[in-house]
Image (cartoon, grey):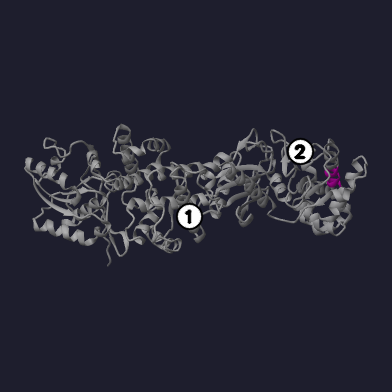
Amino acid sequence: MERVFKMSFESLITYEIKRVSNLFDITNPALSDYIKTKKTFCIIDQNLADYASSLKVYFQKNDIEAHYFFVEVSEKNKNIQSIIDFTAFCFKHEIGRRDPIIAFGGGIVCDLGGMSANLLRRGTPCIKIPTTLCGMIDAGVGIKNGVNYADSKNSLGTFYPPTVVFIDLKFLKTLSEKEIKNGLVEMIKIIALKDKGTWSLLKRNINKFIDKDFDLEVVELIDRSIAFMTEELSTNLLEDNLYRIVDYGHEFGHLIEIITDFELSHGEAVGIGMRLSNNMAYSRGLMNVKDYEDFNGVFDKLNLPYWHKSLSCQKLYAKREAISRHKGGNFSIVALYKIGDPFFIKTMSFTDMEYACGAMNVMEHSHNSSNNNRPDPGYLPKPVYIPDALVFDVGGTNLRAGRYSLSQQKLVSTKKKNTPNIWNTVSNGLPYDTLIKGMIELGKALFPDEEPGIVTIGFPGPITPAGEILSTPTIWGDQFKGSASLISYLQSFWPHSKVNVINDVSAAGYFLKDHYSEDFCVITVSSGIGSKLFINGKPYTGIMGRGGEIGHWVSDTSDEALMCECGGKGHLGGISSGRGALAHAKMQAMLEPKAFEISHVGKIRPNYTEITNEALVTAYSANDEWAKTVIDKTAKQLAKVIALIHTTTGMELFIIIGGFSIALGETYRKSIAEFAGDFCWDLGQNWDEMIKIGPEETEMGLIGAGIFSNAINNSIYENR
């Protein structure tokens, strides 16, 4: 019989990062209080010999037995052999299980000390005293320890929390300018990720770091950097989530260190890595140009390398799988929408990499030629990649969604589902939430790993210029009251996308404007009736967006007038739409059963309650007199309104679209043209030329929304 034994253990990781003064003052108990066994083993950067002397005096005066191991600090010495050498030294001097390791130096020493402490007797206490700016705000703060192995950065390592971390800012006085700049790169990284306000503080004070003028504002920047780093790490100390924004710049940075054989320092490599990520975000039109320029301007003050002779676009692109392996098989690099607003780029083409590298060369040349002053932003190359748009066409029957390529200006993929409306959805009120969920579901299917650049919804009903829905009887009948906005709901799901709502007929009009050079009135005849005047390529709807709603113009004032979805009576939409024609056909069949019985429709659907639009279209196309009488009555009302629009506006071109009108075809168009002439003063109009059936394009609304999105994108770029 098999048995399963389960063990469960949870460990709370808690340690303090203490900023102190005069740590090695013999009267300061801060350090000695953590050495309970009165014995310690120190791994020390050999460049800190002067401070090591103070440390020896401190331990002697506090009766602590201390052993000192000096290490030559370099990335090439950050290896498993250094771990072996130090742990052998500890065993030689009989380290006890509770004797703490003290790591006194920069990030490399903190890594070596932390990893050694974790391995010694499966875990001895570790005290970290980072002496570099990089160590204080980054490497010394977390619980990761690692060494370089197999041509990979930090590929062997452990998670092991220190007992305590001491930050004494006086050690910064020992640093070279290069080391200060290495730390500033990490500071730029964490502040750019976290906070726009602190970014402004950094810009004002960055030169003070170079001058080693550590005043109160500089100290505040260091404190905030540590706080930001602990905030990010504390919820993901063991990296259960591999999407870490603190990897910003390090994805490429670690590769650059390896490719250049560590001729570039860690800070220099990460600096190039961050700018490569920014270039890629900018090339996709995702990073705000002002912040892009601002970021580059701050970096230029440090005069760090833009490139290295060993680097090439091809080499970096060839290493992309290393990034994927490090991220658990899923490629991602961190980039910025703007300062304080990071995101993940989850796909990368060679074109992306080529652009990012090319922009580095452009920036370097521009920087050098301008005597270290930032040139006019016009030097920036225009993005070669534009993120795709997510477009919706909300119909009475179908909710369609599409991915529209703004760079190729075409619809590349589509999804659809039934539109949640008051007739097919059980809800205590309007099925508003169901519609939102459906849109998000389709959007996620089309954009599973990224946000669209722009979201545009073609919606049935009048829309204000601000995107407010004023009415929508096509899907919510007469139950909708007041106004509503889809923008805030969808903006919360796609926070970095520009969300727009336009009328669905307007969306179709944007498609048609590329097919007709003159102004026109587009009229849709489908489940409802709608219209829009397109003048100079744009819909004219008035300052409140109420124009173009001919479907709700009262065209029949008789007692027998049909009801409209909005609750009104005798509206054109309740008469001349597909639904209106169907209702009229059923009424006529009931009133004149013998005529209906011998008609083509009656033979297809003997029971008048089962008449369908398909049966009407079939009979109409077969020249059935009964069907033609029904359709002509609805067409005559539409023609009357077309004549009115022409008379009042002078519009000379009317394009009729929509599934019902296209199915009825040329005979239907000719009937409308003939009726329109009857209702209008004859001034020589050629109604046969003025009324056209639009192209048969099932995705007209989606493509039109995409064309509108492209216009929005162009205006965003021009004003960025």
Against 333, residue 224 (above or below) is above
Image location of residue 189, percent across then percent down: 38, 45
Which residue does the numbered mark 2 point to in the structure image?
552
> Given the current orientation, which residue lies at the most extreme bottom position?
1
Q: Is residue 637 part of the magenta span, yes or no?
A: yes
Side of 220 where 110 appears, left or right? left
> Residue 347: image x %, image y %?
48, 57
The residue identified by callout 1 is 356
- Local SS, label 2: helix
- The image shows residue 405 at horizontal and vertical percentages of 60, 54
Question: Is residue 320 in sight in this rendering?
Answer: yes
Magenta segment boundaries in residue numbering: 632-639
- In this rendering, is residue 357 above or below 561? below
Q: Secondary structure at mark 1?
A: helix
N-terminal-most mark, 2 or 1: 1
Residue 427 is drawn in which quadrant? top right
The quarter of the image holding the N terminus is bottom left
Going by the numbered disc 1, the residue's amino acid type is: Ala
Residue 341 in view (yes/no) = no
Find out whether residue 611 is within the magenta segment.
no
- Which residue occupies the foreground of this view, 548 or 46? 46
**How far apart are labels 2 and 1 at the CA level?**
54 Å
